[in-house]
């Protein structure tokens, strides 16, 4: 089934229009996306490695959860859906803490991604053996220590996607609050 997204204007307001993923990415239409970092009680961050078949950032470590917000959906609902689809894990609304909103524009090849992003933090212990990855999306999951992630971010995002804004939000969380 083709994904449909609410189209936003340059100020992030709903236009009342709905477009397919393909149309949004081909025409560079603004739409919504969410991402979250899951951090366990030992301050380790669970990341997913993107599948080798992904069009953007194949084989790169990415946020724990992320994806587009489908038409009519709230950001938290999208995260709960993505957790189930990509990792086979259950999270609830009470697990999710909103952190910050931002915009991003990324152009790679014929894909123009213009996102209004919602960033969330989930503090929860997830046993990796309970994770059932969606192979089309994810090839691996792994916990990273605070020190290892900070080193990767400082080392030009070594092995990570080049989504600099979210990684820098995580860096701030790790340095200031954990």
Image (cartoon, rainbow, N blue to C red):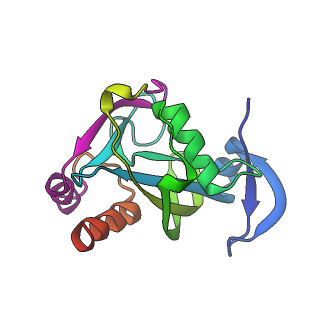
| Residue 107: % across, % down | 51, 54
Residue 29 seen in render:
yes
Q: Give the residue displayed 39% in from the left and 29% down from the top.
A: 131
Q: Is residue 92 above or below residue 2?
A: below
Residue 169, given in percent of the width and then of the height, sits at: 36, 67
Can you say whether 133 is above or below 56 in the image?
above
The structure residue drawn at horizontal position 26% and vertical position 52%, both measured from the top left corner, is 41
Give the x, y percent position of residue 171: 27, 65
Quadrant including the C terminus: bottom left
| Nearer to me, 170 or 163 | 170
Residue 110 shows in this picture? no
Figure label count: 0
Check if residue 15 falls in the magenta segment. no
In the image, is 23 to the left or to the right of 91?
right
Instruction: Determine the residue positioned at 35% across, 54% down.
Output: 162
Q: Which residues are magenta?
A: 133-157
Residue name at image x 54 percent, y 47 percent: 92
106 to the left or right of 156: right
Which quadrant, please, contains the N terminus?
top right
The question of residue 143 being in magenta is answered with yes
Taking depth in this image into account, of 77 and 162 the one nearest to the observer is: 77
Q: Nearer the viewer, residue 52 or 16?
A: 16
């Amino acid at each position: 089934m083709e994904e449909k997204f609410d189209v936003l204007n340059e100020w992030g307001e709903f236009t009342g229009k709905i477009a397919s993923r393909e149309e949004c990415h081909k025409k560079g239409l603004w739409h919504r996306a969410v991402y979250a970092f899951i951090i366990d009680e030992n301050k380790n961050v669970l990341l997913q490695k993107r599948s080798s078949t992904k069009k953007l950032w194949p084989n790169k470590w990415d946020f724990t959860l992320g994806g587009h917000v489908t038409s009519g959906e709230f950001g938290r609902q999208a995260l709960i859906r993505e957790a189930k689809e990509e990792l086979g894990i259950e999270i609830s609304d009470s697990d999710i803490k909103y952190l910050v909103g931002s915009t991003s524009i990324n152009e790679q090849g014929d894909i123009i991604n213009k996102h209004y992003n919602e960033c969330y933090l989930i503090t929860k212990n997830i046993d990796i053996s309970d994770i059932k990855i969606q192979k089309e999306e994810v090839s691996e999951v792994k916990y990273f220590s605070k020190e290892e992630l900070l080193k990767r971010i400082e080392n030009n995002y070594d092995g990570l996607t080049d989504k600099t804004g979210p990684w820098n939000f995580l860096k701030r969380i790790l340095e200031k609050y954990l």
